[in-house]
Amino acid sequence: MQLTVTTWNINSVRLRIESVLRFLREVQPDVLCLQETKCPDELFPLKALRGTGYEHVVFAGQKGYNGVAILSRFPLLTREVVSFCGKPDARHICAALGPEAGQAAGLVLHDFYVPAGGDVPHRELNPKFAHKLDFLAELRAWGGRRVSGPAILVGDLNVAPLEHDVWSHKQLLDVVSHTPVETEALETLRGEAGWIDAARLLTPEPEKIYTWWSYRSPDWAAANKGRRLDHAWVSPDLAGTVRKVEVFREARGWDKPSDHAPVTLTLEL
């Protein structure tokens, strides 16, 4: 059985609903995990999304910022939301695939949106950066308890952890998302919990991988100054099933795009 799971920071699901619908029609993943939906639950475009064949949807939203959602072709048995740093931010949601998913039944999907951290990489001078570091610390403690069975963790983790996850390691060492304190925190929590970085399992360094290109670049495609902020991790028992991790770069060039491209993980179960 082949299972495909896509992660995509959509940067407002209502503003970019046509892009979401287009992606679902063209790519047709089994599961789509969205971040930064920027939508309170009562305004989530559930009817439009279910109309594409994704009948099973769980979401947690807020007005104007954050927000996560999971859309699935298969029933979702459970829904859980974990809060971090004492804040009721909609930054995590998880669900398990139902028995109709065949060999994927029971597989747990975690969808995360880690704080971006602002522009100044200094805990004392930037509360947003302090929040990000605290979030990663709590995620580290949480992660060790969660990898007890088949599981996938995806999302906009807002950290490009490796040297070739950014267009210039040297120039971005002092830029939020690639500072040593962030990259070490993310890689430490991933390693301690046993999560496998699926993209780098198949495409080791020094090959570059990007999933995000800044809106500030007048010609993002030509400049190609990207970062790998969006991740797909699998539990150790799924490592041997990973077949592909694809960045759907085309979506970054669509009308009114998100600055993130969808990333699709393919497993052969």
Image (cartoon, rainbow, N blue to C red):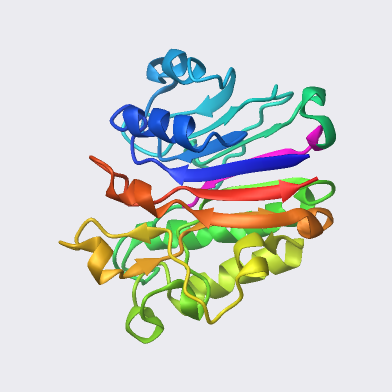
Instruction: Identify which residue, 84 or 21, lies in the foreground.
Output: 21
Left or right: 67, with 254 as reference point: right
Instruction: Please name the residue shown 65% across and 49% down the image.
Output: 266
Instruction: Please name the residue shown 59% across and 61% down the image.
Output: 137
Number of numbered callouts drawn: 0
Q: Quadrant of the N terminus?
A: top right
Q: Where 110 sits versus 207, above or below?
A: above
Whole-percent x, y for residue 42 in the image: 41, 15
Q: Report which quarter residue 81 is drawn in.
A: top right
Q: Where 248 sits versus 126, above or below?
A: above
Q: Quadrant of the C terminus?
A: top right
User: Magenta segment: does it hold 108?
Assistant: yes
Left or right: 76, with 27 as reference point: right
Instruction: Identify which residue, 102 or 129, lies in the foreground.
Output: 102
Left or right: 254, with 50 as reference point: left
Q: Report which quarter residue 198 is drawn in.
A: bottom right
User: Magenta segment: does it hold 138?
Assistant: no
Whole-percent x, y for residue 240 in the image: 80, 59
Instruction: Please name the residue shown 55% across and 19% down the image.
Output: 53
Left or right: 48, with 29 as reference point: left
* Camera sees residue 20: yes
* Camera sees residue 235: no
Q: Where 242 sits versus 17, above or below?
A: below
Residue at the front extreme of this rendering:
26
Q: Where 96 sits versus 150, above or below?
A: above
Whole-percent x, y for residue 222 in the image: 24, 68
Q: Report which quarter residue 110 is drawn in.
A: top right
Residue at the bottom extreme of this rendering:
170
Whole-percent x, y for residue 243 in the image: 69, 56
Residue at the left extreme of this rendering:
218
Q: Which residues are magenta?
A: 104-114
